[in-house]
Every structure is written in C-alpha cells, then in structure tokens.
Amino acid sequence: MSNMRLSMTMGALLAGSLALPPAAMAQPMAAQQYITVRSEPIGASTKLGGTVEPLKEVSFAAQAPGRISFIAGVEGDYHPKDTVLVSLNDDSLKAKWRAAYAEFVNAEAGVGDAKVQYTREIYSGSAMESENTGMAIPKMFDRYMTRPFSDMIGADNPKVARWANVRSQGARIQQAQARLEQARAALQELRASLRDTKSIAPFDGVIVRKHIEVGDTVQPGMPLLEFADTRNLQIKVDVPARLMPGVKQGMSIPAKLDVGDAQIETRVAQIFPMADPQRHTVTVKLAVPPNVPGGPGMYAEVSIPDVTSPVEQLPVIPKTAVLWRGSLPAVTVLGSSGQPELRMIRLGGFVNNNAVSVLSGLSPGDRILANAVAAPTGVWNPAAQAAQ
C-alpha cells in the first residue's frame, strides 16, 4: 500500500513538473516545426571551476605622505578615463615648487650673463682694457708698451693670459648651465611629486574597493582604492597540465555562469607560458561576451575538452528545443501514433552557441519540436522513455 502511494505521488510530481505552460498549449499546429535529431562526433570534456574577473584592474597605493583631501566616490561609482579618483593635500609641495622655480629663473639669468661676459672677453678683452678713461691713453700705453715689454723680459705672456681669460669665461658659462640643469631637475622632481598626490583613472571603470576616507593620513605604499573595468569581463581558470593539449589560443570554450545558469561561449584570450610547479596547472584566461549576467568575483563552470578520451556519436539538438520545468530538461517528441509526447532527457555539453548534446533520452532519427515555446499539449510516456 505504501509503495502504491509513493508511486502515485511520484507520478503526480512528474506530471506536474512536465506539464506544458498554458501559452504553449495555445499555439496553433501551423506554428509547430518538427526536426529530425541528428548525431555528431562529440569528444569528452572536463568541467572546471573558474572565477569571473575584470578585463582590466588596477590598485592605487600612496606614492607620497600626506592627508586625503578628495575621493571621487564610493564602491560602484563609474568614472571615465583621466578622472581624478583620489587627491592628497599638496600645499607644502606647491610652496617648494615655487621656491624651486625661483631658483630656476636665477640660474637661467646666470647663463645669459655668463654668455655676455664670454662674448665681451672675445671681442673687447678684459674689463680693465675696455674702459676708455683718460682719452684712451692708459689703455694704449698698456697695450703697446707695458705688455710687449713684460713679454720681452719674460715677466708675462700676453697670449697665455688672453687664453686664460677666455677659458675662465667659458667655464663660467658651463657652471651657469650646470646650475640651470640642477634647478630644472628640482622642478621636474617636484612636478612628479605633485602628480603622485593624485590617482587618475587609466581607463573607464568603477571603484570596486575603497581603503581610505577623506582626512586619513597616508604613507607611501599604503593602499588607497581598487579600480576595474567591469563592463569587459574574463574568466580565469586553472587547467590541469594533462588537458592543455586540447586548449589553443582563440578557440571557443563553453561556460556556465553562476547567475541564472547562463550558458555562454567564451574565447581563449591568454594562456600563461608556465605551469604552477606546486599544483601542476596552467592559468588560462577566457574572454567573455559583452552584456552577460553576473560580475567580477562570481563563480563560472568551464568545459575543457579532453583530447585523451575517445570521441562518441551523440544526438545533437537546438537549445530552443529544450523545455525546462524546474531543473528537469525535456523535449516534445512526435510519437509513433503521430501525437506529441514529452520526454525527459539528460543533457551533455554545448556543441556551439545554438546546440547541445544529449547523453540519454533521445536517439538519432527521432522527430522533436524545434521550439519548446510552441510545444502542443502532450503527456509524459513512461514506456517510450524506458525504451530509450
């Protein structure tokens, strides 16, 4: 008696699970399109767990000591490229920059003065020689009497003295230019320090984590915030080394996201060149199509092909033919009597974006309804199910 009651309960549950929706029952017969199940060679695959990650992600850390004066927003706020995300108080650095700029102006003026003095030495001699006091008689007496007489008795060498004066003025130019470069380097260093007081978005994205608040005092190396491009996602999965022969750059790999069991087709975007020496796995990154449900940090299940397993001939049907009632997949089969019947099936993996393989419940040559939404009224036939 208890077995009969249990059988009746299970039958009622199955009948309730496989009942077609009222909208589907109202579809006219003309809208129904039956197709013949075909088979394709399907290789074995291994399901691996992966993690959804942003395509681009950057972590900002403090480059200079200071106090936080500005934060662009909170977690989840979107900001375009070149937006200032975090800013430190820079009053002291600006004061140092103004002082360094004044030194730069002085050094620049010193270079100009040194060049003028060098030109004067070349064309007019020393400052004493160029003075025209005394109706030029002292200058003339010094040039035509004193210097030749000193050279004649060996007390002085006018040519060497002249060369020494010119060389001294040239050295003054070099020294002035060195001071100018030193002042310019100090300005560049302060400009870099001022730039380090601001964290600027390198691409369009959102703030995913914030470690500071306005008014906090930070030191170099302290984390500020994390910024990521969450519109473009990828799946990171660690693939065992034995499965790597079946993974190639650019190939398509089916995956299932942990949000509504969304089935998507990914593309191998990057294969790391070296396996983990402890885990003996290779990191593979899969590009995710745009506008998929879910976000960074969520779980994903990836089907990696196993080339070491034999290839099987399995029935392949369109995804649109699968009717889901709860967690049970079923299809509408055209029975031998010409009446539609519901048949439970066991699904395999994705063959492409539009088709899935069937492990049990169907055989090649069966006629099934191509669109589950247009399913007519049907009943579950346990005898036909058991014959499969």
Image: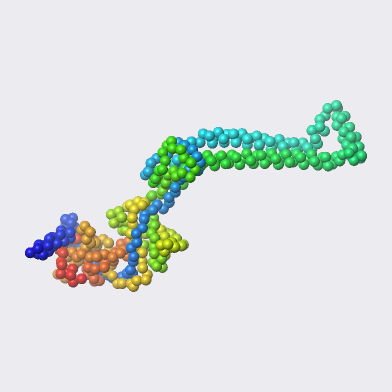
Q: Quadrant of residue 345?
A: bottom left
Visible residue check, residue 247:
no
Front-most of 320 and 249?
Answer: 249
Q: Does residue 198 sit above or below 249 in this rendering?
A: above
Considering the image in quadrants, where does the C terminus appear? bottom left
- On the image, the x and y values in percent for residue 127 come to 79, 33
Q: Is residue 15 left or right of residue 148?
A: left
Q: Quadrant of residue 155?
A: top right
Visible residue check, residue 215:
yes
Task: Give the residue at the far front of this rendering.
Answer: 278
- On the image, the x and y values in percent for residue 123 come to 79, 38
- Identified at 32% across, 58% down, the residue is 256
Considering the image in quadrants, where does the N terminus appear? bottom left
Task: Give the residue at the far left of this rendering.
Answer: 1
- Identified at 85% across, 31% down, the residue is 139
Q: Is residue 332 left or right of residue 283?
A: left
Q: Is residue 388 left or right of residue 292?
A: left
- On the image, the x and y values in percent for residue 39 come to 28, 70
- On the image, the x and y values in percent for residue 64 come to 51, 41
- Identified at 32% across, 56% down, the residue is 257
Q: Does residue 39 sit above or below 199 in this rendering?
A: below
Front-most of 96 and 113?
Answer: 96
Front-most of 302 and 113?
Answer: 302
